[in-house]
Amino acid sequence: MENLLRRCCIEVGIVTSGSTTTYAPMQFYKKTEEYAVEEQLAVVKDEAINNALFFGAIRRVTKLEPIVKDRVRTPFIDRPEIMDPSLLMPYTSAMVRFYGMLNLHKGTLDEVTQVVTPGSKVYVIKDGSFLGNFIKLSGRIGIGSHKYSGWEVPLDPAYVQYHIGVFGATGVGKSRLIRGLIDELLRNGFKVIVFDHSGVDYSTYYKDYTVGSKAISISPPTIASVLASKARLPWQSYGEYLEVAVLTYVMGEGDRNELVNRRVGKWGKQEFLKHLRQSMSRMSAREATVHKAGLFIDYFVNEEFFEELNKRSVKPGDIVRNSLERGLTVIDLSQDTDLVVKQAIVADVINEAWDMVKRGEVNTPVGLVFVIDEAQNYVPEDSWTICKDPIETTSREGRKWGLSLILASQRMARDIAANVRANLGTVFFSRLPTQGDLRELSGYMDLADVNESVLTQLGIREFFVAGLLNPLRKPILLKIREVR
Ligand SMILES: Nc1ncnc2c1ncn2[C@@H]1O[C@H](COP(=O)(O)OP(=O)(O)O)[C@@H](O)[C@H]1O
Ligand SMILES: [Mg+2]
């Protein structure tokens, strides 16, 4: 133990009165005050405990002074000239928030069951590489190291299926972090489908694995949703008509036997409008309803949308199969400028994966991860989108089939539907553009007193990781490794 402390740690202070099993208050020595920095990892050595060290993070660093106390009035306040500065004894206090007990004998990280004795020495960990010896995982995902101790924190691939969220202001490095994660997931045998919203974050880096979204076909029911959305036709009144019209346009009318040999007709705006009016009339839609549907689609949906349907020949099923074979597919959604169409592709690909799983076409769990960056466009809190339902279903039930999500956006609340974000087993978070997200997160994840003010100081590539992927199960501050 002495050896370890000498090699990897620096003695910085002692535990003061008032410790519990969750934390120990401490004071820094004058000569080591430079080490009074939040989020450093620390150990506490209690002489009464053999072969074990309390282990945790430094939080709530506070500068105090016993004469000019914050809640006591002294004559010096109004007459600073009578105060001799040499009388002051400023000192730095903090707390060590415990994460566990390092059992040096067994090499395990155990629960803290004892309370540390006041006067015990506190050490800040300068080289955390030894910490790896206390964590036993069957695989490892490494995307960065602890900011101060340099410990390359091994993340646990067993919990990827509980979904991952990445949150932080623009430019903090969310997309780079996810790229680091993707490489590690592939190395661990996962399959990944990336929905690249803007086409700059992933497509350019995985060129050989990228498919342009314009090549991907959209299923008839989803085309109906896209048309309703684009033409602003309420689904309640028009959904059924649109679905029938699109299906019969693609498959033809008549009974099944007759349909088998029919070739898919060419898409065209005028042809479709004509067909829609006939189909709706056949379904006894009111004259005014037929008129409005035709008029609105004519006005709001351009020719190009229909023309492009003809060029969409890659089936979502091919995308999924390709990903399972090759490991990775990136879908460059920037080819489709229309958000509704992007959502449609996300919906169809995820739905297809579910269908394949349910039909038993692939071995489960599949270990397939869907990456949805800029997720506020796909599962926002307060509006419906075409792909919201499949994303929600995946977040709720995907785990048992091995279908999981990585979602990224700037904020948690509002950007991501509440039921989806409550299902995120692991969250990476950095500087957040709004207050309050951290409080909400603390509702379903142990944040061990990480406070908002620390977040505002974080730089680029600095993220806390909290939740299941993190073997400590309490947030730790990572510096994400350099991603090309
Ligand atoms: N891990 C990293 N390695 C190298 N550069 C990074 C890393 N993270 C962020 N950067 C730099 O910061 C910029 C913004 O990162 P990005 O991942 O696009 O942020 P975000 O997705 O949060 O907006 C990148 O273009 C890059 O220059
Ligand atoms: Mg980004």
Image: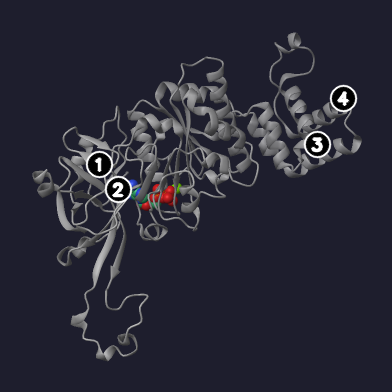
Confirm or deny contact between disc 1 and disc 4 (CB under 8 A).
no
- Mark nearest the camera among 2 and 4 is 2
- Mark nearest the camera among 1 and 4 is 1
Residue type of the residue flagged with mark 3: Ser
Q: In x, y percent, where is residue 481?
A: 29, 45
Picture quadrant of residue 458: bottom left
- Mark nearest the camera among 3 and 2 is 2
For the residue pair 292 and 186, the one nearer the viewer reads as 186
For the residue pair 483 and 36, the one nearer the viewer reads as 36
Q: Mark 4 points at which residue?
A: 282
Q: Which residue is drawn at 54% across and 34% down?
A: 213
Q: Residues within 10 Å of mark 4 (few under 14, many from 20)?
A: few
Label drawn at residue 237? 3
Structural distance between the alpha carbons of marks 1 and 2: 8 Å
Confirm or deny contact between disc 1 and disc 2 (CB under 8 A).
yes
For the residue pair 380 and 55, the one nearer the viewer reads as 55
Q: In this view, does 289 lie above or below 457?
A: above
Q: Name the residue under label 2.
A: 98
Label 2 SS: strand
Q: Name the residue under label 1.
A: 101
Q: Residue at x 78, y 36 (%)?
A: 236
